[in-house]
Structure formats: structure tokens, C-alpha cells
Amino acid sequence: GENVEQHPSTLSVQEGDSAVIKCTYSDSASNYFPWYKQELGKRPQLIIDIRSNVGEKKDQRIAVTLNKTAKHFSLHITETQPEDSAVYFCAASIGGGSYIPTFGRGTSLIVHP
Amino acid sequence: DGGITQSPKYLFRKEGQNVTLSCEQNLNHDAMYWYRQDPGQGLRLIYYSQIVNDFQKGDIAEGYSVSREKKESFPLTVTSAQKNPTAFYLCASSENRGGSASGRAVEEQYFGPGTRLTVT
């Protein structure tokens, strides 16, 4: 089955800096890659996603890049703010197939004011 | 926060007792999922159901059971056979089939608020 590795497990940055979280996946059939944000005490929510036919997607201060050949994808957050502090999960799934996502272990992002 | 609910928010049980966690959704989603979240472990899939009256084991199904008698409901029972049941449990749902009327990805998982189970 699919295996998703996520790094780093903890990331500490100063407000205004950029943050990058990286994930690798093992199943070349995976074609849908979402990122979820879970604030303390709250439920995970989708913040951005990308499909395998696209190399990059942006939404304001966040972006996701995908390298299908290397089987890795990354979340980029620019101009970080304290409210970006949360746990971020990447996932991979086969859209149009089972749809069952495999999640990474999560990255705890801490943005210091 | 509407759409998918879980109850109760906190649950305490004695060892050896079975306990059932509730999950309800009014999103008309076909698929529903149960995850267990432990610190540093991410989201691990317990069971999932892609259609009423059908469900499949996930990666850590031992000691758990589910039912899917109605599209809206997917309760999870934590049995006394689960060796380490204390955890945070998250339920989720997704459209999965066909095109999304909302324009969002059909694979997007909508999570409930979670139930924190403590077994002593």
C-alpha cells in the first residue's frame, strides 16, 4: 500500500519567515495530494490540494509543489503569521479509485511573534 | 462547523467495557471514515465505508467494530479487545463519487470535532 513520509516533525520559525514542509509518497498511482491544517483543539481542515497533472498551485500565502518523478510534494507558507501555528498533515490518494487517503505523521509549525 | 458531528466530546470508561462513539453527517456524502490520532502518529485509519451496508478495515481495525445502516451515520465501537484505547478519535466523510456540486474536490475529507476517549 501507499506510504507517506513527512518532514520535519516540528518546525519553528519567526513571524514573517517562510516555512516549507515536505512529503514523499511511494505509490506512483497516487494522483491527489491534499494538505490539512489542524489548529490546537480543532478538527483538521483542507487548506490546499494538488492533482498529479499540475506542478504547482498557489492560494495567497500558501503554495504546494509536486514532483511526480521524485514522488514528493511540498507545502510552502510565506510571510508566516502566529495564526499559522498548527499541525499540518499531507496525504496521498488515488482519485477515481479507492479515494482512501494515506496521511503523513504531521508537522507541528510554531510561528514566534 | 456544521455538517459532521461527533458525540460526546469527552468520554471516560473503565477497562473491559465496550464503548460506542457517534458520528453523524448531513452532507449527503457517500463515504465515511474513522481515524485514531495519537501524538506523533498522524491520522491512522481504523475503518471506512464507501456505501451504506458496506465497510472495510483500515490499517488498525483490531479491537474496533463499525456499522453503516444509514448513510448519515457511522458509529464506532471500541471493544475491550482494543489493547490501548485511550486516544483522540476523528470521524470524516467525503463525496468520493461523481462530480462535486460545490466545485471542491470529491476526495476532500470533512472532519468531525473528535471524541477524546480515556480508558482507565
Image (cartoon, coloured by chain):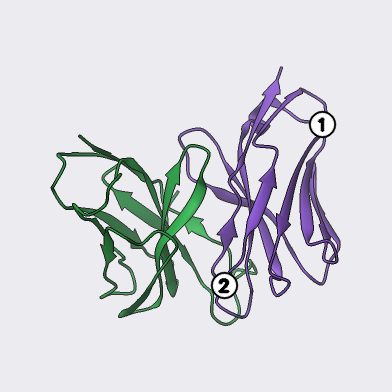
- Of B86 and A51, the residue lying toward us: B86
Q: Are marks 1 and 2 in contact (CB under 8 Å)?
A: no
- Say the numbered circle drawn on residue A79: 1
Give how far apart the Cα atoms at labels 1 and 2 are: 33 Å
What amino acid type is highlighted by mark number 2?
Tyr
Image x and y of residue A61, in percent:
80, 41
What letter labels the chain drawn in green?
Answer: B
- Say the numbered circle drawn on residue B33: none
Which residue is at a point 71% across and 17% down the rendered structure image? A113
Q: Chain A in the picture: what colour?
A: purple
Instruction: State which quarter of the image contains the C terminus of chain B.
Output: top left
Judge left or right: residue A101 versus residue B76: right
Q: Is residue A78 above or below residue B66?
A: above
Which residue is at a point 82% across and 72% down the rendered structure image? A53
Q: Is residue B14 above or below residue A104?
A: above
- Say the numbered circle drawn on residue A99: 2
Looking at the rendered structure, whether the residues under marks 1 and 2 are on a common chain is answered as: yes
